[in-house]
Image: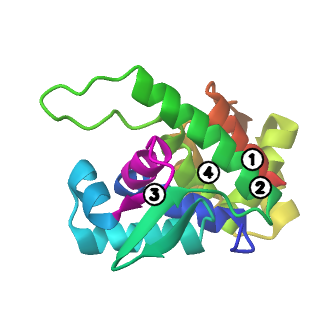
Amino acid sequence: MKTREFWKVCKKLANEERIDVLRKVMASPDKNGLPVGQISEAVRLGQPATSTYLAQLQADCGLVTCERDGRYCLYRAEPDRSDAKAAELFSALRKFFIAEAAGWAPVNGARPIAPPFLYVLPALANATRVRLLGLVRERKRAAVAKIVEETGVTRINVHRHLACMERCGLVALDGDEVIWREPLDSLSRLFIKLSLA
């Protein structure tokens, strides 16, 4: 990714509106790209917000590119070719969004249901949390005191990060022990793998 840490990408993608913008660009059959106005209209966001999200998806995530065509900027889904993580994530997301678009019919203009991986991303949007998540995942079960001892993170911060992971469904707290819960969907597992790599 253009950013050095994958957790920053997870932080950017942990936003439903940004995911809607990415979904529209990735599921588009138009190979030349889409103008901001068309994307904005499709996702029901203002053009300034859509432009900001597209710029972040391009610069921070490496998942879209922009080309100028006269007075229009055309955005298309294309990974940052210099980064293996971006290419792997791009491929998985594109398959997901194309499959989702093929099997989803809007009712009264309703937006698609949030993808399952969206609920895992907040747990991966912090470098310390990713480090703690790696420890718990590796052991499947760990004592909070042992995590505090090994990481040097204060007990209160360990509990705060574990609470976030529990809300995301990645761990279960059993007294003073943490139990790892592997996500069921493949995209969530891919996000975790790329975060820990």
Q: Residue furthest top?
A: 103
Which residue position is annotated with label 1? 88
Q: Which residues are magenta?
A: 20-35
- As helix, strand or loop, the secondary structure at mark 4 comes to helix
Q: State which tag comes first along the sequence, 2 or 4.
A: 2
Image coordinates of residue 15 in percent, x first then y, are 41, 56
Q: State which tag comes first along the sequence, 4 or 3.
A: 3
Q: Quick check: can you spot residue 171?
A: no
- As helix, strand or loop, the secondary structure at mark 3 comes to loop
Which residue position is annotated with label 3? 33
State which quarter of the image contains the C terminus. Answer: bottom right
Amino acid type at circle 1 is Glu
Q: Given contact means CB atoms under 8 Å apart, are the residues at marks 1 and 2 in contact?
A: yes
Q: State which tag comes first along the sequence, 1 or 3.
A: 3
Check the image and report above or below for 108 versus 192: above
Q: Please give the name of the residue rendered at 77% of the width and 59% of the height, measured from the top-left corner.
A: 131
- Disc sitting over residue 126 in the figure: none
Query: Quick one: 94 or 120, which is closer to the camera?
Result: 94
Amino acid type at circle 4 is Leu
Which residue position is annotated with label 4? 162
Q: State which tag comes first along the sequence, 2 or 3.
A: 3
Image coordinates of residue 162 in percent, x first then y, are 61, 51
Amino acid type at circle 3 is Gly
| Crowding at mark 1 (Cα within 10 Å: few <14, some 14-19, many 20+) | few
Q: Given contact means CB atoms under 8 Å apart, are the residues at marks 4 and 3 in contact?
A: no
Q: Residue furthest bottom?
A: 71
In this view, the mark in front (1 or 4): 1
Is residue 36 part of the magenta span, yes or no? no
- Disc sitting over residue 85 in the figure: 2
Q: Please give the name of the residue rendered at 61% of the width and 63% of the height, measured from the top-left corner.
A: 9
Query: Quick one: 4 or 165, which is closer to the camera?
Result: 4
Q: CA distance from mark 1 to mark 4?
A: 28 Å
